[in-house]
Amino acid sequence: MARPVRCRRICFEPKYDSFSPCGAGQTEQVLLSVDEFEAVRLIDYEKRTHEQCARQMGVSRTTVTEMYERARGRIADCLVNGKTLCISGGNYALCDGSAQSGCGKVCDRKDYVAGKAAAGRKETGIMRIAVTYENGNVFPHFGHTEQFKVYDVLDGKVIESQVVSTEGSGHGALAGMLSERKVDTLICGGIGAGAQTALAEAGIRLYGGVSGNADEAVDALLAGDLQFNPHVHCDHHGEGHHHGEGHHCGENKAGCAGNGGNC
């Protein structure tokens, strides 16, 4: 069993979440996680040592060095090859002002809830919804998603949301990841029978066969209007994983979540 990733403490979320070459138009994207951004901010901008950065973020010096080198490599790739840098996701919690090195940040309720979501904790009465996520939309296949957007709901209203990286986890580990983060509801496109079983065993309610904008899907669920397929199924075999005869996901029977048979 893989060792669980320790939640990283950050003081500030980035003010800007993407950077792209001027006049380059649409370019290839490189993803930098928020915790990797924080390592660069502390070491390069605030001139902290790796040891000081590790203490601030609540992780080991080795972890900080790995994050920092990975982040610098991704930034260099963007500068040299003209790619777009996007800052999103990661395994982190916003600091509550208790860091020994003293960032002095006093968190409001929004920060507090976001920190709990990242750390896998949840206040009483909070409903936590996860959506397979890519570029604002519901990603069409659960097992291949690289991100979830996680929403905390109180009294029928979204009070906080954040994008969380799957850290390269595949089918078998994703249900466990969601369970650790106290997710109780999942919205996704196509999903295989094994993953459905794992979710059911974890007590996570499934709404599959969903496509379109992720935020709108959550709003529809809270309003009781979400269109989903209670019998969603998705078989895949290698790249492209097209469905065989009689297999489909999504209510329009056009394939996985309506994407022409791909999931």
Image (cartoon, rainbow, N blue to C red):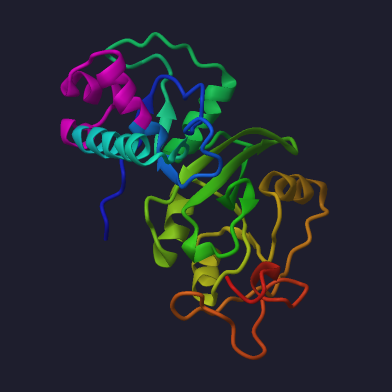
Front-most of 121 and 234?
234
| Residue 253 location, quadrant | bottom right
Q: Is residue 184 visible?
A: no
- Residue 30 falls left or right of residue 63: right
Residue situated furthest front in the rendering: 23
Residue at position x 51%, y 25% from top?
A: 16
The structure residue drawn at horizontal position 74% and vertical position 64%, both measured from the top left corner, is 228
Residue 77: name its quadrant: top left
Task: Point out the stretch of residues depicted in magenta.
Answer: 37-64
Residue 47 position, x and y percent, is: 24, 14
Residue 56 located within the stretch drawn in magenta: yes
Assign the magenta stretch its main secondary structure: helix
The residue lying toward the viewer, choosing from 3 and 25, is 25
Expressed as whole percent of the image width and height from the top left, the position of residue 175 reads 47, 60
Q: Nearer the viewer, residue 177 or 78?
A: 78
Task: Specify whether residue 174 is in view.
Answer: yes
Point out residue 35 in the picture as x, y percentages from the top left corner.
36, 32
Asked if 198 appears above or below 130 in the picture, the reply is: below
Quarter the C terminus occupies = bottom right
Q: Position of residue 199 (x, y in %)?
A: 53, 63
For the N terminus, which image quadrant?
Answer: bottom left
